[in-house]
Image (tube, grey):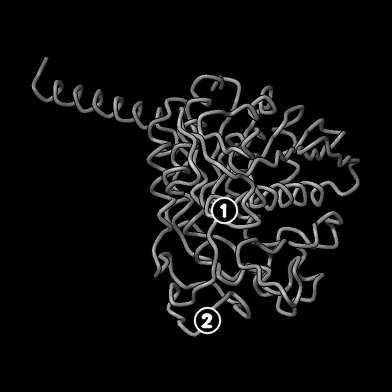
Amino acid sequence: MSERVQRGFFCLFFFFLLLLALKVRGSVYDGNGDFFTGTWMLDKSYPLYQPSTCPFIEREFRCEGNGRPDLIYTHYRWQPLASKLLRFDGKDFLEKMRGKSIMFVGDSLSRNQWQSLTCLLHSAVPNSNYTLTRVGDVSIFTLTEYKVKVMLDRNVYLVDVVKEKIGRVLKLDTIEGSKLWQGIDTLIFNTWHWWYRRGPTQPWDYIQLGNKILKDMDRMKAFEEALKTWGKWVDSSVDPTKVKVFFQGISPSHYNGSLWNEPSAKTCLRQQTPVPGSTYPGGLPPAVAVLKGVLRTIKTPVRLLDITTLSLLRKDGHPSIYGLGGPTGMDCSHWCLPGVPDTWNEILYNLII
């Protein structure tokens, strides 16, 4: 064997090993390309649906219906720099998912994405019968013709909160709620926004880590420990030949204009255009690095919907005073629909097909 052939053989072998390693770490590499680095382009063919074609948009996301006067925020399309992002095709999605189930698991940002997907699908087949039911904490949208179920399990920490004699205990090591995730074909997980809640809205009194019961602990560390517990569940319970697993990523908030070079802005109110370019001046939230670190330890392929940067650029996409709280509220955490979560689902569509 000549020296040139030997070098070629070893190069190919090394490349194969590299691809194998990256595939195992599904959250780091995606064979479909990089959909998450790009810019927002004004495109009058967007939004992908009109609010009038989605009668079940919840009030907190129904910004136009709540009186938001500007609609330019609905006309932006995400343009990746290095990959082609196919426009969402609801009929194609339904055909490929025929007879299958999708479940979003997480907090109200999961509900935001779940509601977006139900709107995208219903608007694609407006004359197709559907049912919308709720069983406990699980909401189920079913398109009966296609036998497709799009489900939402409200589970803000992924790990358990258990009522005990001492009070409500957030157990970072247990994940009994996972019983609801069995038998689902595609799972999209999310947790983050509740980890720093304190006071009356904090839904636990103690944290348990191993045998230690604590009144409190470093919240970022608690977030990391919960993710590790979830990751162990993925490795022990998910068959990657049958089930696709995604993590939604960290959805950002916009309450500090200095992070997008507008120090006078204290909220997202009256923001009408995205941050230009493909990078966010204020950088990424620290939770992103923690999440990616845990995902790298999971052996089962988990694809990260790395939506943080593209969403950081959309300071204009929140309800502000046109959400659930009305003029007395200020919501710069959730997203208007139609809006940014439609792009999250457009990327999900490109990763699934």
Q: Quadrant of residue 253?
A: bottom right
The answer to whether residue 291 is seen in the rendering is: yes
Q: Is residue 293 left or right of residue 311?
A: left
Helix, strand or loop at mark 1:
loop
Question: Is 278 placed above or below 142 here?
Answer: below
Callout 2, which amino acid? Ala
Q: Mark 1 and mark 2 in contact? Answer it, CB < 8 Å.
A: no
Where in the figure is residue 103, as x and y percent of width and height?
68, 36
In this rendering, which labeled residue sits more in front, label 1 or label 2? Answer: 1
Callout 1, which amino acid? His
What label sits on residue 265 in the rendered view? Answer: 2
Look at 73% across and 76% down and name the residue there: 328
Question: Is 103 placed above or below 278 here?
Answer: above
Tell me the crowding category of disc 2: few under 14, some 14 to 19, or many 20 or more residues within 10 angstroms, Cα based.
Answer: some
Look at 55% across and 28% down and name the residue there: 174
According to the picture, the residue beneath numbered tag 1 turns out to be: 193
Closer to the N terminus: mark 1 or mark 2?
1
Helix, strand or loop at mark 2:
loop
